[in-house]
Image (cartoon, helix red, strand yellow):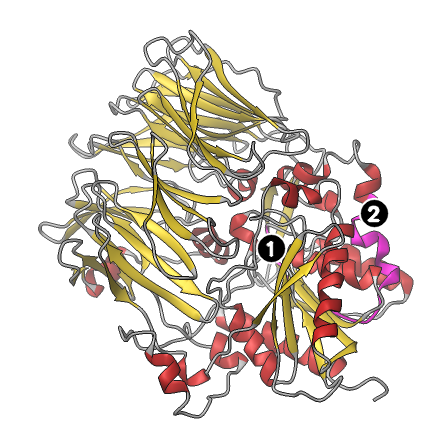
């Protein structure tokens, strides 16, 4: 339930690419009749809004911006803004043949694994097609296969900084291909001796909960590689079963649950030609603590970030790769838990990172003695941002020009703008216009892409120059026929006076007590779902509204994006404060809108939101119908990193694991419940649903259940999504729509 998992953005459907002004939408809507929106229109075909450019990638020199457009790669010239086909459809199809599994497709999408990367010389591309690595020469349009990783996701191919070699992970080992040697030989530089020893390969729990995207890095001079070794021998296994083949198959996943041993981790350095690994000595506890990030401070020095198992201590070390000696230069700590933003940037004796030490997530600049790194602790030069807002993303740290490009909620906690800060503390806003702006900055020069959206406005993509001039290169009018309505925004005070935000979408009926209300929160920590951004959920909300339902979304205390105190309400509290806030908002909506029927309340959610559905229906008698998709039902069943961050270990907080695990309150379920789960879910395992169902059976409580064979946590695919959302609609039509007494 990391940032990647928390907001399950819905798959939408096709439209013609267009570049018409958004302002034309309102004029057209008043002249044309509304087109009904259906579950099939949203999920059964291609995306309803079309396909915004995928995998936007800058060349290393900043002179090319490439993206996937259907089955071809398009290059957008930053100088002219004009697109042209870079790699044709015929050539790309030939290079990208593959037969990815459901899990590999899910992981590549979920964890942002690119299907192609630029070479340092900006004249070649490396394609990764289901484990087959191709070098494509942009000058003559030819491709050569240079390696095979054997896996469809997680192989993490990279060029060396000098472009003379390519590295990747194969069979849990780290391999290097020398591109300029005869026959392009492959050398396994860090071989693994067993299936439980991962050299440079990211495991599931680091990928999901620490957002680790790579576990090895080239030295700046291309002579060595630093890698993380993960020994999972003591980590328990969970069987992921596939019942679709005639003979069922089992994939054993290493999955540490609360209190279980974590992987033993250590950082090693090996020559790019192979040989003996030199190990860094760190004062961390084996099978307990974490190494979320590491890298090269310069060609002679490593930096390593460590995190204690209880999430209260985060340290930065510098290390000598020759001797293996390490020196702690920075300590961060928190009495409850640290914020889960672990990215660090280190170069030229400077460290940039974010933390919420002053109550909000802000940027900090530290320096250290680059020539004598063990001589003293890092010095805080300055806090680069401050105030009642959050730094939400850091896109680029330019150590040469001493500036940082980032996004923050300054000015509006529900929106996001792009900003730039210099190392001396000066700041300027880059983006304009309301809504939610996301950036993609060129590695060289000042060009960037601004992806702007709002609740009822799909993304508009602009290519911007360093001087600030921006030009639209992608937007759509495909949703105009549906006349989408913006939901009403609500502000409600929690019992402690905290402002809570919500949105309410109402159907047309204004008769008293004529409208059933569906509550659809996420509710869990690490996520801010109530923002003025396009997420796709509005489309299904509109379907529900056209069927006569009102839909309420709200962020309760314990969620992210509102500062440390707001999120730390989830510390040792995985239900009470969250439900209290949601009921407060429900009551405010009922009081303000007499057409809402207080006797016809429904609730549905996914992942933490699915757990929240079960908590609400077992701790309140106000909800007549609910749907829980992929819920955690016993917090002892979820992974160690996420759960222990908020709930500590089971032995340290046994009453919390008992009280907040809904499996223990299943007998108290009120209302009509539908459970849905994918059998291939490697995030929230199906055992959660099975255990909850067993408790319902023991208590004689009826339930409905939908199983999606082979599907992962996202239950993706047009057939599965269409079936699931039609089933959600039918559940509310059957059990929530009829007035009480009918």
Residue 77 coordinates in the image, percent (x, y): 16, 56
The circle drawn on residue 659 is 2
Q: Which of marks 2 and 1 is nearer the N terminus?
A: 2
> Looking at the image, which residue is at 76% across and 49% down?
634
> Looking at the image, which residue is at 43% across and 17% down?
318
Say if the magenta span includes residue 575: no
Q: Is mark 1 on a helix, strand or loop?
A: loop
Q: Is mark 2 on a helix, strand or loop?
A: helix
- Distance (Cα) linking label 2 and label 1: 25 Å
Residue 366 coordinates in the image, percent (x, y): 42, 23
Q: Nearer the viewer, residue 711 or 147?
A: 711
Against 26, residue 273 (above or below) is above
Kindly indicate the quadrant of the structure image that contains residue 16.
Answer: bottom left
Against 7, residue 125 (above or below) is above
> Looking at the image, which residue is at 57% across and 15% down?
283
Residue 469 coordinates in the image, percent (x, y): 22, 56
The circle drawn on residue 517 is none
Image quadrant containing the C terminus: bottom right
Q: Which residue lies furthest to the left in this view?
A: 140
Q: Residue furthest right?
A: 699
Q: Residues within 10 Å of mark 1 (few under 14, many from 20)?
A: many
Against 414, residue 132 (above or below) is above
Say if the magenta span includes residue 675: yes
Tell me the magenta residue range: 658-682
Q: Residue 351 vs residue 485: left or right?
A: left
Q: Name the residue under label 1.
A: 681
Kindly indicate the quadrant of the structure image that contains residue 631.
Answer: bottom right
């Amino acid at each position: 339930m990391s940032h990647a998992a928390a907001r399950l953005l819905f798959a939408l459907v096709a439209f013609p690419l267009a570049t018409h002004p958004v302002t034309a939408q309102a004029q057209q809507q008043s002249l044309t009749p509304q087109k009904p929106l259906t579950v099939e229109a949203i999920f059964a075909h291609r995306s309803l809004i079309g396909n915004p450019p995928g995998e936007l990638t800058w060349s290393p020199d900043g002179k090319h911006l490439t993206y996937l457009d259907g089955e071809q790669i398009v290059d957008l010239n930053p100088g002219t803004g004009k697109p042209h086909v870079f790699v044709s459809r015929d050539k790309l199809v030939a290079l990208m043949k593959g037969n990815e599994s459901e899990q590999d497709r899910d992981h590549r999408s979920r964890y942002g694994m690119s299907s192609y990367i630029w070479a340092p010389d900006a004249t070649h591309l490396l394609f990764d097609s289901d484990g087959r690595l191709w070098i494509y020469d942009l000058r003559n349009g030819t491709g050569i296969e240079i390696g095979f990783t054997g896996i469809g996701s997680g192989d993490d191919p990279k060029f060396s900084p000098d472009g003379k070699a390519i590295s990747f992970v194969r069979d849990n080992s780290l391999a290097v291909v020398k591109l300029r040697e005869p026959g392009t030989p492959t050398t396994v530089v860090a071989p693994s001796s067993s299936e439980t020893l991962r050299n440079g390969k990211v495991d599931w729990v680091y990928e999901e909960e620490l957002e680790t995207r790579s576990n090895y890095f080239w030295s700046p001079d291309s002579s060595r590689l630093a890698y993380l070794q993960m020994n999972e021998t003591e980590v328990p296994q969970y069987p992921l079963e596939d019942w679709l083949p005639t003979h069922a198959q089992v994939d054993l996943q290493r999955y540490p649950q609360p209190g279980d041993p974590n992987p033993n981790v250590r950082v090693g350095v090996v020559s790019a030609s192979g040989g003996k690994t030199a190990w860094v000595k760190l004062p961390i506890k084996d099978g307990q603590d974490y190494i979320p990030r590491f890298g090269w401070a310069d060609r002679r020095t490593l930096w390593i970030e460590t995190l204690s198992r209880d999430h209260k201590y985060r340290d930065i070390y510098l290390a000598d790769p020759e001797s293996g000696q390490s020196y702690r230069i920075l300590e961060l700590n928190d009495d409850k838990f640290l914020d889960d933003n672990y990215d660090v940037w280190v170069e030229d004796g400077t460290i940039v990172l974010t933390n919420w030490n002053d109550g909000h997530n802000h940027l900090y600049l530290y320096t250290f003695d680059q020539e004598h790194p063990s001589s003293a602790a890092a010095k805080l030069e300055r806090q680069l941002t401050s105030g009642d807002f959050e730094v939400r993303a850091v896109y680029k740290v330019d150590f040469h020009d001493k500036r940082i490009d980032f996004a923050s909620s300054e000015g509006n906690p529900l929106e996001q703008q792009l900003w730039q800060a210099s190392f001396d503390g000066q700041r300027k806003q880059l983006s304009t216009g309301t809504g939610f702006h996301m950036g993609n900055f060129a590695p060289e020069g000042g060009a960037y892409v601004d992806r702007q959206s709002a609740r009822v406005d799909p993304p508009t993509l602009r290519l911007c120059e360093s001087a600030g001039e921006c030009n639209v290169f992608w937007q759509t009018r495909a949703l105009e026929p549906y006349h989408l309505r913006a939901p009403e925004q609500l502000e409600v005070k929690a019992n402690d006076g905290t402002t809570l935000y919500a949105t309410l979408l109402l159907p047309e009926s204004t008769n008293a007590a004529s409208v059933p209300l569906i509550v659809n929160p996420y509710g869990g920590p690490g996520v801010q779902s109530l923002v003025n951004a396009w997420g796709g959920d509005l489309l299904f909300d509109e379907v529900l509204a056209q069927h006569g339902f009102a839909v309420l979304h709200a962020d309760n205390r314990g969620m992210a994006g509102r500062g440390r105190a707001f999120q730390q309400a989830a510390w040792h509290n995985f239900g009470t404060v969250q439900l209290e806030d949601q009921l407060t908002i429900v009551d405010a909506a009922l009081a303000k809108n007499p057409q809402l029927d207080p006797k016809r309340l429904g609730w549905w959610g996914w992942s933490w939101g699915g757990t929240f559905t079960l908590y609400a229906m077992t701790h309140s008698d106000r909800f007549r119908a609910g749907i829980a998709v992929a819920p955690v039902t016993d917090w002892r069943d979820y992974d160690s990193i996420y759960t222990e961050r908020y709930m500590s270990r089971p032995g340290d907080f046994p009453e919390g694991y008992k009280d907040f695990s809904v499996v223990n309150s299943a007998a108290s379920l009120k209302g009509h419940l539908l459970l849905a789960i994918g059998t291939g879910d490697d995030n929230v395992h199906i055992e959660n649903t099975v255990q909850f169902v067993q408790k319902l059976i023991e208590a004689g409580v009826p339930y409905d259940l939908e199983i999606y064979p082979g599907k992962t946590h996202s239950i993706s695919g047009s057939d599965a999504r269409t079936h699931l959302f039609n089933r959600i609609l039918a559940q509310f039509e059957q059990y929530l729509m009829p007035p009480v007494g009918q």
